[in-house]
Amino acid sequence: MRDTPQRAIRDLHTDSTITVYQAYRPEIGLPAARDGRFPAAWKRERMTWIKPSFLWMMYRCGWGLKAGQETVLAVEITREGFDWALRNSCLSHYDRQTHTHRAEWQRELKQSLARVQWDPERDPHLQPLPYRSLQLGLAGEASRRYTDEWTVSIRDITALAHQVHALVKDDELDAAAEMLPAERSSRALAFNAAYRETR
């Protein structure tokens, strides 16, 4: 734990793709998983938040039990697209170590197409851990590219969320851990995110 970076992108990825998670009401989530693309009801003009951490998504959607988040999706997108979003991102909040003046951050925020937010990672009981994982908000062109260009596949993993939740409730943590996505840090992606934190 001592060697764990305070901020890093931990994800399920290949050389060319990265998997992120979102949760939607069934009217959006089920057609998206069936067709491999988001339906017309999915608003491209709205900001959408993608999460590379499975357990953080479980915290956010309550294992797929929260109203309006009953369908949990694993969205595989191109790594090139994800890196593009990072390069065109801004921190979602003012950080005096990153920006000299609040006005500088506000100008960058208005112009950016993506927003970086670091939230505490979660353990299987969804309790916060002493290091953070990424949420990435996509707006405007970034949101359109996400759904129209970057998306490789969309899978409904609601059943997986429920199965892992049941094992955690029964204190079968080893069995639950075996079912979790094999997330690991990507040096290239972590470098890009660190760049956004320190430039």
Image (cartoon, rainbow, N blue to C red):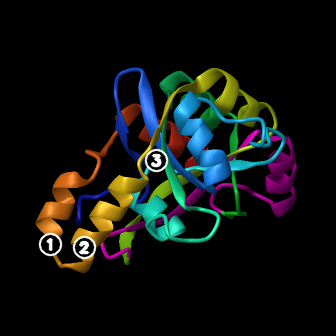
Q: Is residue 195 left or right of residue 139?
A: left
**The magenta stretch spans which residues?**
97-126
In the depicted structure, whether residue 170 falls above or below residue 40: below
What residue is shown with label 3? 52
Disc 2 on helix, strand or loop? helix
Q: Which sits earlier in the primary sequence, circle 2 or circle 3? A: 3
Of the two numbered discs 3 and 1 in the rendering, the one whose residue sits closer to the viewer:
1
Residue 126 falls in image quadrant: bottom left
Image mark for residue 168? 2
Q: Which residue lies at the image location 83% right of the left edge and 52% below the top edge?
A: 104
Q: Which residue lies at the image location 75% right of the left edge and 30% below the top edge?
A: 144
Percent coordinates x, y for residue 120 in the rendering: 45, 68
Q: Which residue lies at the image location 22% right of the left edge and 53% below the top edge?
A: 179
Q: Which sits earlier in the primary sequence, circle 3 or circle 1? A: 3
Neighbour tally class for label 2: few under 14, some 14-19, many 20 plus, Cα within 10 Å: some
Residue 54 falls in image quadrant: bottom left
* Quadrant where the N terminus is found in the figure: bottom left
Percent coordinates x, y for residue 100 in the rendering: 75, 57
Q: The disc labelled 3 sits on which kind of residue?
A: Pro
Q: Is residue 63 left or right of residue 118?
A: left
- Please indicate, yes or no, whether residue 116 appears anywhere in the rendered image: no
Image mark for residue 172? 1
Q: Which residue lies at the image location 72% right of the left edge and 63% below the top edge?
A: 94
- Please indicate, yes or no, whether residue 137 appears anywhere in the rendered image: yes
Q: The disc labelled 2 sits on which kind of residue?
A: Val
Q: The disc labelled 1 sits on which kind of residue?
A: Glu
Q: Pointers 2 and 1 in contact (CB under 8 A)?
A: yes
Q: Which of 75/132 is in front?
A: 75
